[in-house]
Image (spheres, rainbow, N blue to C red):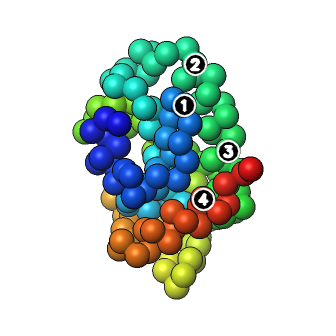
Amino acid sequence: MNATFEKFGWPATLVKEFDHWAVLLRPGQVTLGSLVLAAKSNATAFGDLPTEAFAELKLATAAIEDALTCFVAFEKINYLMLMMVDPHVHFHVIPRYDGTREWQGQHFPDEGWPKTPALNNAVTPDALQRDALVKALINHWPA
């Protein structure tokens, strides 16, 4: 895995692995269920990914949306490709909703709704919460 994976807490944050992509829990939960969809390639430009990665992207995004629909009941979903600090190809996946979601006593507001996600206002779970959140997302993953 590349350095971008490590930045986002891999392997502890791994939710699902595909041939060309991995789904990680985003350490900073902009909204409940925020993820990172990271290419397993060392590519630093989206267009440099192999053709097979683009085909698999459809499978990965469909599975993400199914899982997050069940887990967080989002109203919209944002895929943000922000490769300014972490250079390898990845998307920040932000489920969007009006108001706040609660999970295990923790509140996760969507501070930016209905506009741009408030990336700087993320909730950062501790290690125990992170592990429980990863497990919950895995349990909501489509078969």
Determine the CA span between mark 1 and mark 3.
Answer: 14 Å
Among numbered discs 2 and 1, the one appearing first in the sequence: 1
Identified by mark 2, the residue type is Glu
Q: Which residue is mark 2?
A: 52
For mark 4, give the secondary structure: helix
Quadrant containing the N terminus in the rendered view: top left
Picture disc at residue 63: 3
Label 3 sits on what residue type?
Answer: Ala
**Residue 63, above or below 83:** below
Q: Which quadrant of the view contains residue 54?
A: top right
Q: CA distance from mark 4 to mark 2?
A: 24 Å
Foreground: disc 2 or disc 1: 1
Name the residue rendered at 29%, 48% in the picture.
7
Q: Earlier in the sequence, mark 1 or mark 3?
A: 1
**Label disc, if present, on residue 19 of the rendered structure:** 1
Q: Do the residues bearing badges 4 and 2 touch, measured as CB atoms within 8 Å?
A: no
For residue 138, the mark is 4
Separation (CA) of disc 4 from disc 3: 11 Å
Residue at mark 3 to residue at mark 2: CA–CA distance? 17 Å
Instruction: Report whether 22 appears left or right of 88.
Output: right
Which three-letter amino acid code belongs to the residue tagged 1? Asp
Against 3, residue 113 (above or below) is below
Give left or right: position of 3 versus 115: left
